[in-house]
Amino acid sequence: MWGLFDENITKNSIIILLKKSGGMTIEELSKVVEITPMGIRQHLISLEKKGVVTYTAKRQGIGRPGFIYKLTEMADTLFPKSYDNFAVETLKDIEKNDGRSKINEIFSWRSKRTFRARKEALREKKNIAELVNGLKDILESEGHLVELELIDGFYHLKQYNCPINKIAFEYEEACLHELQMYKDLLGCDIERLHSITDGSQACIYVIPAD
C-alpha cells in the first residue's frame, strides 16, 4: 500500500484508483469506493483544486457527456521516486571506474549548460539589483524556495531547498560549481555563508549591492 497522499483516506483511495486505472468516471469510483456519486464529486473537486486531478469529456450517445477523471502530471510527484539514489549510485560507479576528476568534469558540464540558459534569461538585466532579482525569479521557477533581503549594502539570497540535496551531500563539487556559476552570472564576488550540506536551514549567499 502506498503512503498517504492526503489526510483523507477516501481521497487517497481515489488517487490510487486513478493511478491504476488511467481514468474513471464518478459512477465507477462510487461503486469501488462505496460512497455516493455526490461524495465522490466533492472529493474530486478538492483534488482538482490541488492540481492533482483533471477530467475529459466522454460521449455517451444522446444527452450530456460524462467525464473521465484522471491524474495530472503534477500528481506523479505524489508517488515514491528513487532518482536521487540512482544518481548517487551512478556517480559512485563513475568515480570508481574513472576517478574523482571525472566527477568534477561532469559537474562542470552541468554547470556550463545551466549557466548558458540562465545567462540568456538574464540578458536584459542592466544592474546588480535587476540581476539578483532575476536570478531569484529563475530559481523560484525551477522549484527553489527562495528569500532575498537587502542588509547593510549586501543582498542575502537564501535557498531553503536543494533539488540535488543527496548528491550535494556526497559530492561537494556540486556546491562549488553552483557558487562559481552565481559569481559568473552576477559578475561580482559572492560569499556563501551557510550551506544546507553543513546542516544549515538554507544556503545563504551574500552579494554586494553595488
Image (cartoon, rainbow, N blue to C red):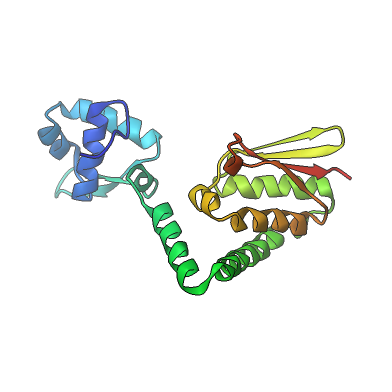
| Residue 184 falls left or right of residue 138 | right
> Which of the pair 199/84 is nearer the observer?
199
From what the image shows, is residue 112 above or below residue 16? below
Q: Is residue 35 above or below residue 187?
A: above
Counting labels gives: 0
Place residue 65 in its image quadrant.
top left
Specify the farthest residue to the bottom: 98
Compared across the picture, whether 51 is left or right of 99 comes to: left
Image location of residue 55, percent across then percent down: 30, 44
Instruction: Identify which residue is drawn at 70% across, 53% down.
Output: 179
Residue at the location (15% across, 26% down)?
A: 36
- Left or right, 102 with reference to 183: left
Q: Position of residue 87 (x, y in %)?
A: 44, 59
**Where 101 falls versus 185 (above or below)?**
below
In the rendered image, residue 174, in percent from the top left (x then y), is placed at 60, 56
> Is 59 placed left or right of 116 in the picture?
left
Asked whether residue 179 appears in the rendered view, the answer is yes
Q: Residue at coordinates 11% horizontally, 29% vertically from top-left?
A: 34
- The quarter of the rendered structure image containing the N terminus is top left
Q: Is residue 119 above or below residue 133?
A: below
What is the quadrant of the C terminus in the image? Answer: top right
Residue 67 visible in image: no
Query: Is 202 or 148 nearer to us in this picture?
Result: 202
Depth order, front residue of 1/203: 203
From the top left corner, tell me how far across and down residue 170 is, in percent.
52, 53
| Residue situated furthest right in the rendering | 210
